[in-house]
Structures are given as C-alpha cells and as structure tokens.
Image (cartoon, helix red, strand yellow):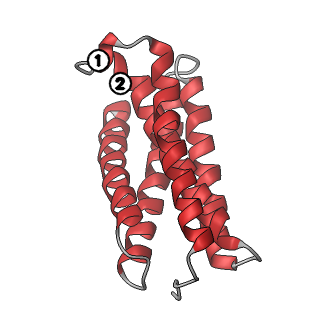
Amino acid sequence: MVFSTLLACHVLAGLTATVCGAAAMLVRKRPRRHPFLGRAYGLALVVVVVTALGMGVLHWPHVNHLLVVAGVAAASAAVGYTARRVRWKGWLPWHISGMALSYIAMLTGFYVDNGPRLPLWNLLPPVAFWFLPAAIGAPLLARALARHRTRPRQLSG
C-alpha cells in the first residue's frame, strides 16, 4: 500500500515535472510564465526525488542506481535554482546548465526504469537508456548556452 501510494505520487509528479520543465524551456524568459513554470518544475522534481527515495528504501538494493540518478537531478536543479536566486557573477550559464542537466537526469531515470517496457524503446540495448537522453539533451543545452552567450541580457525577473 505504501509503495503503491509513493508510486502514484511519483508518476504524477514526474509527468508534471516533464510538462512544466519543457514548457519553461520553450516560453519567453520574462517575469510570470517562465518563473512560474520553473517553480512548478522544481516542486514537482522535489516530489519525484522524495518519492524515489521512499521507493528506494522499500526496494533496496534493486533500485539503488535510480537513487543516484535522482540525486544527480536534485543536485543539478539546486545549482540551477541557486544560481538564479543568488545571481552570482555569471549566473545564467549555471542556471541553464543546472536546470537542463536535472531534466536530462530525470528523463534518464525514467528511460532506465521504463525503457525495456516501452514499444520501440524495448528494441534498443539497455545501455541506450542511460545515454540517449544525454545524447539528445547535450546538443540542445550547448545551443541554449550559445544563444544566451551571444544575445544581450533580457531577463529581468
């Protein structure tokens, strides 16, 4: 019963984080929408990580590799969030990288755990589940960093 409840919360939070994270990446970086979606992503990711920890304790050691992925997602998001909140010198690349890496880690955890049961994905070798999210996400992250390095600063809130 406890595991089922954690799993239901985990799936709902994962879907919320996936949608809000993608939306935050795609909207204009202005006050209101981007910060709202970013906070929603961050809160949903916290629920994903907390429920992953709970499920990990219940199914230890079979899912300990997923706990490492959850830790990477949480740490990356914390760096991205802190960079924006504190606004240390050169904060924008840290914010973009931290949030993007947390999203990539979250998707990696999903595919490692669920890829073998997904149509078409189940045809891939298991190692692909570990590397495909990063192989797709890294060039997109590099593009975002390059775009924001050459464009004048427009974020204000």
Looking at the image, which residue sits at the far front? Answer: 150
- Residue position marked by numbered label 1 in the rendering: 117
Q: Residue at x 55, y 43 (%)?
A: 138
Residue 57 falls in which quadrant of the image? top right
Locate residue 53 relative to residue 9 in the image: left or right.
Answer: right
Which quadrant, please, contains the N terminus?
Answer: top left
- Does the CB distance between marks 1 and 2 fall below 8 Å? yes
Instruction: Choose between 26 and 63: the one closer to the eye.
Output: 26
Locate residue 90 relative to residue 10 in the image: left or right.
Answer: right
Q: Position of residue 68 (x, y in %)?
A: 62, 33
Secondary structure under the numbered disc 1 in the rendered image: helix
Instruction: Choose between 12 and 28: the one closer to the eye.
Output: 28
Q: Position of residue 86 (x, y in %)?
A: 70, 78
Label drawn at residue 94: none
Q: Residues within 10 Å of mark 2 (few under 14, many from 20)?
A: few
Residue 50: tell me if it is visible: no
Q: What amino acid is found at the position of numbered circle 2 in the picture?
A: Asn
Q: Is residue 75 above or below residue 27?
A: above
Q: Residue at x 46, y 29 (%)?
A: 132
Q: Residue at x 38, y 69 (%)?
A: 37
Residue 104: tell me if it is visible: yes
Secondary structure under the numbered disc 2 in the rendered image: helix
Instruction: Choose between 137 and 147: the one closer to the eye.
Output: 147
- Residue position marked by numbered label 2 in the rendering: 114
Q: Residue at x 40, y 74 (%)?
A: 34
Q: What amino acid is found at the position of numbered circle 1 in the picture?
A: Arg
Q: Residues within 10 Å of mark 1 (few under 14, many from 20)?
A: few
Instruction: Choose between 41 and 157: the one closer to the eye.
Output: 157
Report the Cα–Cα distance between label 1 and label 2: 6 Å
Q: Position of residue 145 (x, y in %)?
A: 59, 61
